[in-house]
Image (cartoon, coloured by chain):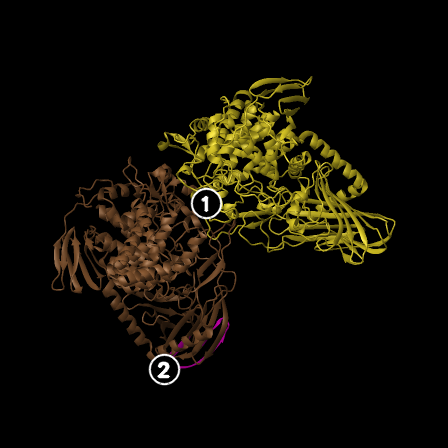
Chain colours: A brown, B yellow
Amino acid sequence: MLHRERLKPPDYVYPADEWKLIEKRFYPRFLEQMETIFSTANGYLGMRGNADEGTPVYERGTFINGFHETWPIVYGEEAYGFARIGQTMVSVPESKIIRLYVDDEPLYLPTANLIEFERVLDMKAGTMDREVLWETPAGKRVSIKSRRLVSFQHRHLAAILYQVTVENGEAPVVISSELVNIRDEKRSGVDPRRAKGFAHRVLLPKLSYNKDLRVVAGYQTSNSRMTLGCGIEHAIETDCSFSYKSKSSDDGGKVVFSIDAQPGKPVQLTKYMTYHTSRSAPPEELCERAERTLDRAATHGFERILAGQQQYLEDFWRRSDIQIEADPDKTPRRIEEVQQVVRWNLFQLLQASGRAEGAGVPVKGLTGNGYEGHYFWDTEIYVLPFLIYTAPRIARNLLKFRYSMLDKARQRARELNQRGALFPWRTISGEEASAYYAAGTAQYHINADIMYALKKYVNATGDKEFLYREGAEMLVETARLWSDLGFYSERKGGKFCIHGVTGPDEYNTVVDNNTFTNLMARENLWYAAETVNWLAKEQPARLRELVDRTDLDLSEVGEWERAADLMYIPFDETRGINPQDDSFLEKEVWDFENTPADKYPLLLHHHPLVIYRHRVIKQADMVLAMFLLGDEFSLEQKKRNFDYYDKLTTGDSSLSVGIQSIIAAELGYMEKAREYSRYALLMDLADIGGNVSHGCHIASTGAVWMVCVYGFGGMRDYDGILSFNPRLPDMALRLRFPLTVRGQVLHVDVGKESVTYSLRQGDGLVIQHEHEEIRLSPVAPVVVRTYSRPNYQCGERPAVPNMR
Amino acid sequence: MLHRERLKPPDYVYPADEWKLIEKRFYPRFLEQMETIFSTANGYLGMRGNADEGTPVYERGTFINGFHETWPIVYGEEAYGFARIGQTMVSVPESKIIRLYVDDEPLYLPTANLIEFERVLDMKAGTMDREVLWETPAGKRVSIKSRRLVSFQHRHLAAILYQVTVENGEAPVVISSELVNIRDEKRSGVDPRRAKGFAHRVLLPKLSYNKDLRVVAGYQTSNSRMTLGCGIEHAIETDCSFSYKSKSSDDGGKVVFSIDAQPGKPVQLTKYMTYHTSRSAPPEELCERAERTLDRAATHGFERILAGQQQYLEDFWRRSDIQIEADPDKTPRRIEEVQQVVRWNLFQLLQASGRAEGAGVPVKGLTGNGYEGHYFWDTEIYVLPFLIYTAPRIARNLLKFRYSMLDKARQRARELNQRGALFPWRTISGEEASAYYAAGTAQYHINADIMYALKKYVNATGDKEFLYREGAEMLVETARLWSDLGFYSERKGGKFCIHGVTGPDEYNTVVDNNTFTNLMARENLWYAAETVNWLAKEQPARLRELVDRTDLDLSEVGEWERAADLMYIPFDETRGINPQDDSFLEKEVWDFENTPADKYPLLLHHHPLVIYRHRVIKQADMVLAMFLLGDEFSLEQKKRNFDYYDKLTTGDSSLSVGIQSIIAAELGYMEKAREYSRYALLMDLADIGGNVSHGCHIASTGAVWMVCVYGFGGMRDYDGILSFNPRLPDMALRLRFPLTVRGQVLHVDVGKESVTYSLRQGDGLVIQHEHEEIRLSPVAPVVVRTYSRPNYQCGERPAVPNMR
């Protein structure tokens, strides 16, 4: 049950197009949303969809993944062990600004007389294109075409092609192309989701210079001492006469072109932008790197960069595209619309992760710094499934990045009086940055989430090498933590209990025996034991290495197995459900009836104590457990749990609806599955969460992939066995998606009555379709009929035979 | 079980004297403790026991009750309803500084050659006296005698008599008497108990001037906009020739006396100091008031002020003194020592509350601003019992002060989505100032604590007038809150449950059905219903007034009664105990064995999550309930609970040992009662809590009175029936104390074998002694034999007949 709708942008904002997101008019009132939605990024460098002219602006932003400022977290009341170092991904100097003056009048979109306006996010080309026809106050008609791209091929590079033509007369035209360090502002307000602003000057200028058409500048952050070198370079092409001047200062620099424009003669400016960052190299060194990038870009030219971009994207879509055919009789939506929305979400996944090498996936990608641009469990649970099955190398990089934080996680466990390692709930640098432990540090499940993703990665790729080195070490330390954290409770019949933690649902915090946490911890413990046991048997040399790195005593493994085998899993006999935690069923039910829509999300309108003492859920918790560890529940059990929790779930978190949709689909609640999938698909494009202005919900874009593949595609991958129980929603005729599995490429093509499995790459793969084994070979696709199941209304009892 | 001792000051610091606390040497290493312990205050104005010379200083401090600065509470992560306005009692300009120079050499205690040194806190005279014989580097012997007092008679006034004599030669002597606004410093560190420092200038100078021997200055606080006028005036008397200069500036001013001292001829300086504060009057006006106070003081002279002080104290001790005779055969302590320690605690109670008119009792009195100088429940539960039975007028003032906060409490309840009123957990201004809700806002029991004190006050004084006006209104609003906060739980058999609150014990926070809270809320609800019902029956006009002020619907009263009657009181059949809350018995027991002494208090060495997930107690919680509402438990039940909880209690709070001692005494665990009473008595004097440097633990001083009267005196006052079951500890021969009851004065004199009850004032009182009614008349005392009960070791089963 989602308690509010907030489908802000009306249909006409996005005309239907299956490869493009199109804005047909300039809507000042959607400025803040569109800045996010039209972002361009490559996982390393990201630019919000700010206007070329620099204004109007809701929130400026060019971000480098991992580039952050630190600040001492201040508490009204201090306590031992509270996280101390705040971290915020900060905007680097703006390089994308190109100001235009015709007859000395600036182009300013909100007041300009725009005869034509169109902005396109081209998801096939990987560009943001804008075409404007502007009539100046003096009656000049000026055509401005710009194309912006952040290169996937060259992750330090972005480029803009900017073309101006005065169509109906002569006019002096000035183009001011800038690189400018705009100071941040301190923000206030109670919304914990928005990033902190800074009162101090974050980027200290270290050097800056200009030569010819180039400006270069180096900076260092005030507190975190990170360094940055950035620069812009230009090429201009026109038959009109022109001159230029460039200058630089502490705040950056600019190149200003003055052109005597002739009617119909275009002026074409190419701008190359680059950023290099480091934790150790001096800014001078980074400026040299920046110059080398600019040299190369100028040599290559825009067209070659664009071609590289298109090639990268072609490869991406080949590996990742999901195609959906809507049934025109069953939905008012056109095929292109659904396809557009799905692709936009996948495109965001790429933009958030593509070149995120040596860094994580910020919760908003590089489209904004909501939640301070931190890395959360979102990466492992919501983004990695997509990457594991479409770009396993990137998935591996991200897991490797977690591994690089292991020492800090060990230290953090010590601060919390535990053995092993505790990964930070939110972080950039590896230090815990959660300033509110109840919905932060207490989410110990982060450990198990990462290990869950590790297992999925290893199973799907067969990358045992990674498991035995980095994986095993993380498994040992996380298992140690669980084993030390919990205890055997006499009152629970000697079962292993875990107290005082917060599960995924942040409306019930610091609870005992959160079922999700206990299940995931059990999985973590089992996998750790299994891995070490296997090493002991088969790879004694590797085991010795592991013991060397972890001081592992093999008797510990027995402790893990015992804790896992005796793990307490809450179950309520009366209701036949798994309570979310020990006290969940004791609570007073939230008064949904008397909560008006404008009081959601509850967290912005109620004191945490008020929320915590009631039975109300922010986001899928038990339901998420039933997805991640679905083979540990019978279908009947899932149904009882889903029926119970669904009506208590506000969906105040963007992480919820996608998961709810998947389980609804599994249970045959197809109308509900479709409804929730719609919320997931439109989370950002329709601003369902109400805060897309702070950046895209990358976890939700990952959930969109999961809704298609796990939900309607019915895929499951428990213990590495790939199975499918597809079930299309009524409004869809066909669903197609590719999967990369152990180096092979499988195409799944789900129709209304049959499914076709084709092995496009690889030499043989065994899968299951509706519990029957299918052996695929590259010779020919396998076509199977879908098991004809009726659809249920929520609350009905499904007549499906026991599928456990 | 107290897990550590920290009896820092050795015996020789305080030589035995039953009316004086004496420091025989200057110990730099005890500087920070002694500044607190030698404080002088009158409940309105307080001065830390800083050296006259101004240095050395650990923490300077002159405080005016209620005079505070505000600051925006910053949260690492914001949330709705969090307290916003921080409040800190700040030091006002220092007026007590008198610097002395002989031969231009300053007297600086740590390096001076002190031939003699003695400092005395004279609890009969109400003065701090110091005598120093100083040999200067040049060999001059200088005698310095000073006497400092903060007047109880004139609450805006303090005075110092300062006498200097160069004994063995001539010397130029300079005395610089100052009034100086010393800027605060920002502090850091994780100790949440210490007050915040400020980076900004707190006191903005508004005016300052000097004339003759007088300096006057006016200030306003930066944020809270409170105003202050203060001044100093002098009189000098000597046969030596002298001159003086005075000056003033933004930071205050000074009068500097230059004297040609002759051998053996004393120079006597009298300094008068005054402070006036306001929330509205301009500083100019307050400076005029200050001048009037100084005029009057100068006219009266020091001796008359001193005489007034002594008279006030004589009256105080007559109403409040507790006399204990130690048995020289049973204790190494001398009678005077025990008496000294008891009196010092009582004296602090007076100093914290005596003239606290229109304000509360800060948690550290006026001896320091630990915990920001806030008012907590300490006032109602720990201090008011003493005041109710010794100075009912002051008790009334304090309850009236709570009443003045009722509107803000109503508003706070709204912010927390509740009807009625919720008093702030900690505050100066009436706004909730707790920046950590788990051990702050969540302590809803504050409401019931205040109502509990109201009932005790009304019963002991018979002041129905107060009950029907202020009392009833508070009762209605607090009852409303409870009735709205809880709910009838099916899972608890339809009982009324209160979830998501924190009880007194701050090591178990945000729990369900904290037994203490439920019991106290029930008492609150019953008393509210009873009061309204009585008004309805007997005082319809007053009821109409009440309805007018509260919009009371009489049907609400039925709801309160129902909630109270059906209140859920946790009980564990297996152990036969009342669990502290619903989840308490589910927890893993704290590993006391492996917790070294230096890891206490736990809160300074463990993350809250670590503490909260274990079964460990900071302070008496169930045990406190058994004291406050002892008639709701059988003795057997009390014993089972005490035995169970005692070993889990760290005593990390100073509020604990006194209560543990009282219940131990009731159960006949006399050795334990004595041990805990020793901790209570020495909490500050032996720095048991380790932070007496931040100020006295006023609640603990109140607990000392309770230990004597309720503990060893065996007094109980359930529902206004005064009963006694005295039981002296082995080491005591006799215990005597006076009580003011409904305007009468009762003296209780407990000996080893008999008790004497004498009515010293009043015309008749009915009490109970060991369950037998005794009718007292002014004619003659009643002597009764004490019931000879054996003493038990903790863990034994007492053979006492059922006393319920």
Q: Residue furthest front?
A: B329
Residue B364 picture location, percent across and down: 61, 42
Kind of residue sitting beneath label 2: Asp
Number of other residues with Cα within 10 Å of mark 2, as a class: few under 14, some 14 to 19, many 20 or more: few
Q: Nearer the viewer, residue B291 or B760?
A: B760
Which image quarter: residue B417? top left
Residue A208 picture location, percent across and down: 48, 75
Q: Does the magenta stretch include residue A295?
A: no
Q: Distance between the residues labelled 2 and 1?
A: 76 Å
Residue at image x 29%, y 73%? A308
Dot 2: element: loop
Residue A283 picture location, percent across and down: 46, 73
Q: Residue A239 carries which label?
A: 2
Compared to A55, does B93 lie above or below? above
Compared to B36, does A719 lie above or below? below
Q: Magenta part of the protein: which range?
A: A232-255
Kind of residue sitting beneath label 1: Ile
Residue A500 visible, this orientation = yes
Compared to A363, does B404 lie above or below? above
Q: Residue B221 carries which label?
A: none
Number of other residues with Cα within 10 Å of mark 1, as a class: few under 14, some 14 to 19, many 20 or more: many
Q: Mark 1 lies on which chain?
A: B
Q: Mark 1 points at which residue?
A: B611
Q: Mark 2 lies on which chain?
A: A
